């Protein structure tokens, strides 16, 4: 019984495993079944369109796959993308910027230099004005007179060479004795320091010394007559009253860039007897020709007149 059951089971399985001899009938579709009612040539166009869609789809898939493969390749094995960093200058931009800055500096430096020179000139005029006030106060205390002319006096007692000493109680600050454009040093407030003062400023000694009487009496043109001025020596004139000696006292007889009229671009600052201060061009400052005892120098010139002569090193 058991054996017969097994035989029946095996026979059934074998029957299932055998290929089916019964074929399903093929379903035939006419060529015009895709679009019923259309002629055959329209079906051909449809096939062509379908074929193009298939080709396009295949190429698109291949491109996508190639891009996917590239994204998997590290940057070390493929060319790095060239991107410009907009936060950095290119060489042309850098050179252009440097050129523009150089041009601007070239235009601004002369103007800045003139501005500094103008500021020093204004400070120099202020110094001369303060010193002029000191002279006026001294004259008020001495019946309108300044120290007298002295001949054959020792250097440390000569009024013309030591005006910084006898007028010191009236101006007090020795910084006033140094022109801002001068390369000299501020003298010490001692007899020796005053004696060694080479002079940023000079007192018009021959023209305003006390032997001539009260200052505002004999100076008939006080607004045009010098009391103090830019110079290289402490007084004018200690010696012969000539053009050559005037050049020496003003330090115009040598090519200096920091003394006399050289300090202010070919100009000289002056303090006048009437109390005002002004800047004058070099030729106007020298005032030649100038008659004896006439403004601006009020000096008894040799031969009665100061004739204009040669100015050494005129281009200052």
Image: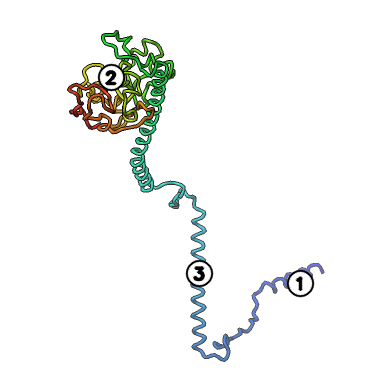
Choose top left, top right, bottom left or bottom right for residue 192.
Answer: top left
Element assignment for label 2? helix
Residue 122 or 80: which is nearer the viewer? Answer: 122
Up-down relation of residue 214 to residue 117 (above or below)? above
Residue 67, position as x, y percentages in the image: 50, 59
Horizontal relation, residue 268 to residue 30: left or right: left
Residue 173, position as x, y percentages in the image: 43, 19
**Which badge, 1 or 3, is on the more N-terminal residue?**
1
Image marks 1 and 3: residues in contact by CB distance under 8 Å: no
Element assignment for label 1? helix
Residue 85 or 67: which is nearer the viewer? Answer: 85
Residue 232, position as x, y percentages in the image: 29, 21
Whether residue 67 is visible here, answered yes or no, is: yes
Element assignment for label 3? helix
The residue under the point 31% across, 15% down is: 211
The residue under the point 52% across, 86% down is: 43
Image marks 2 and 3: residues in contact by CB distance under 8 Å: no
**Which badge, 2 or 3, is on the more N-terminal residue?**
3
Up-down relation of residue 198 to residue 96 (above or below)? above
Residue that badge 2 annotates: 206
Residue that badge 3 annotates: 58
Up-down relation of residue 113 to residue 206 (above or below)? below
Residue that badge 1 annotates: 8
Residue 95, position as x, y percentages in the image: 35, 45
Looking at the rendered image, the disc whose residue lies closer to the viewer, 1 or 3, is 3
Looking at the rendered image, the disc whose residue lies closer to the viewer, 2 or 3, is 2
Measured Cα–Cα span from mark 2 to mark 3: 115 Å
Residue 252 or 204: which is nearer the viewer? Answer: 204
């Amino acid at each position: 019984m058991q054996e017969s059951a097994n035989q029946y089971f095996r026979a059934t399985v074998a029957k299932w495993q055998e290929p089916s001899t019964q074929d399903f009938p093929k379903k035939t579709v006419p060529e015009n079944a895709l679009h019923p009612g259309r002629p055959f040539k329209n079906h051909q166009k449809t096939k062509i369109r379908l074929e193009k869609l298939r080709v396009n789809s295949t190429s698109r898939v291949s491109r996508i796959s190639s891009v996917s493969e590239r994204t998997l390749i590290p940057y070390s094995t493929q060319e790095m993308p060239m991107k410009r960093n907009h936060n950095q200058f290119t060489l042309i931009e850098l050179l252009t910027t440097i050129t523009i800055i150089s041009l601007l500096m070239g235009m601004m430096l002369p103007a800045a230099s003139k501005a500094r020179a103008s500021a020093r000139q204004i400070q120099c005029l202020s110094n001369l004005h303060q010193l002029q006030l000191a002279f006026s106060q001294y004259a008020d205390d001495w019946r309108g007179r300044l120290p007298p002319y002295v001949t054959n006096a020792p250097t440390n007692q000569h009024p013309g060479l030591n005006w910084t000493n006898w007028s010191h109680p009236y101006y007090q600050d020795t910084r006033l004795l140094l022109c801002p454009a001068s390369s000299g040093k501020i003298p010490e407030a001692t007899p020796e320091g005053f004696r060694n003062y080479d002079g940023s400023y000079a007192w018009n000694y021959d023209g305003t010394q006390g032997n001539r009487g009260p200052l505002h009496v004999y100076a008939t043109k006080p607004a045009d007559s010098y009391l103090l001025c830019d110079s290289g020596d402490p007084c004018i004139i200690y010696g012969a009253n000539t053009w050559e000696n005037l050049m020496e006292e003003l330090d115009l007889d040598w090519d200096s860039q920091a003394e006399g009229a050289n300090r202010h671009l070919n100009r000289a600052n002056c303090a006048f007897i009437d109390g005002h201060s002004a800047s004058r061009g070099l030729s106007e400052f020298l005032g030649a020709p100038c008659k004896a005892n006439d403004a601006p120098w009020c000096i008894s010139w040799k031969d009665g007149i100061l004739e204009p002569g040669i100015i050494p090193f005129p281009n200052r």
